Amino acid sequence: MGRHRQFDEGEALDAALSVFWQKGYEGASFDDLTKATGVARPGLYAAFGNKEALFRKALDLYDAKYMGFMAEALNEPTALKVAERILRGCVTLHTLSSAHPGCLGMNGALACSEDAEPIRRELVRRRAATQSALRRRLERAQREGDLPSSADCAALASFVMAVAQGMAVQAKAGESRKALERLVDHALGTWPTTQP
């Protein structure tokens, strides 16, 4: 019979998530992770695998714990409300904690070496899936007459994601929640509308 682990994996994963969110994938050392989790390196390896596997599990936790607003936004009744829910949700998330401002996905991928290329690709894949879901929702809005026929739904989805990602970078650089809210107000003021 194998030895039982002496730590709570959920708590350890939460602690690792916080480290990755603050320092990014490459910026987080295994020493940082062992200090934050209180688990020695062999225990972390046994429970989660290597650093890449641990980061992927932290990403899954981040998505489950913090990113639910993205999927919920797609159920809003209008395209403008969809965009607003996404952008305001991002402001809340990016300014949730002064210990780790910004977005785990952006913080994790902005500076990656060749060794971290699989992580960069995974983060790009996840962002692309989110943008694709948003584009499909906007296309539906266009079919329903909520967006003008001249609107470029792919460009609009890219615009919303670019604003969200830009706000993550700005939050990481210390921009205030109030300033990010003003940015959202401006972005939403440019939204295409159908003529009455």
Image (cartoon, rainbow, N blue to C red):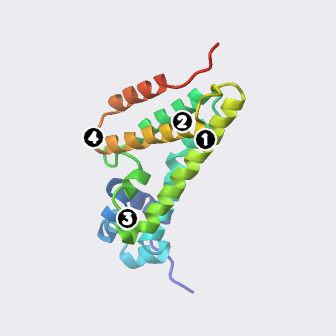
Image position, residue 33 (x, y; %)? 35, 66
The local crowd at label 4, few if under 14, some if 14 to 19, many if 20 or more residues have their Cα within 10 Å, is: few
Outermost bottom residue: 1
Assess whether mark 1 and mark 4 are in contact (beta carbons under 8 angstroms). Answer: no
| Residue bearing the label numbered 1 | 135
Q: Nearer the viewer, residue 3 or 142?
A: 142
**Mark 3 residue element:** helix
Q: CA distance from mark 1 to mark 3?
A: 39 Å
- The disc labelled 1 sits on which kind of residue? Arg
Q: CA distance from mark 4 to mark 1?
A: 30 Å
- Which residue is painted at 67% across and 31% down in the image? 141
Choose the circle earlier in sequence order: 4 or 1: 1
Q: Secondary structure at mark 2?
A: helix
Q: Quadrant of residue 115?
A: bottom left
Q: Give coordinates of residue 133: x percent, y percent.
A: 62, 45
- Residue 8 in view, yes or no: no
Residue bearing mark 4: 174
Answer left or right for 89 relative to 139: left
In the depicted view, which residue is nearer to us: 83 or 33? 83
- Do labels 1 and 2 touch, CB within 8 Å? yes
Q: Quadrant of the N terminus?
A: bottom right
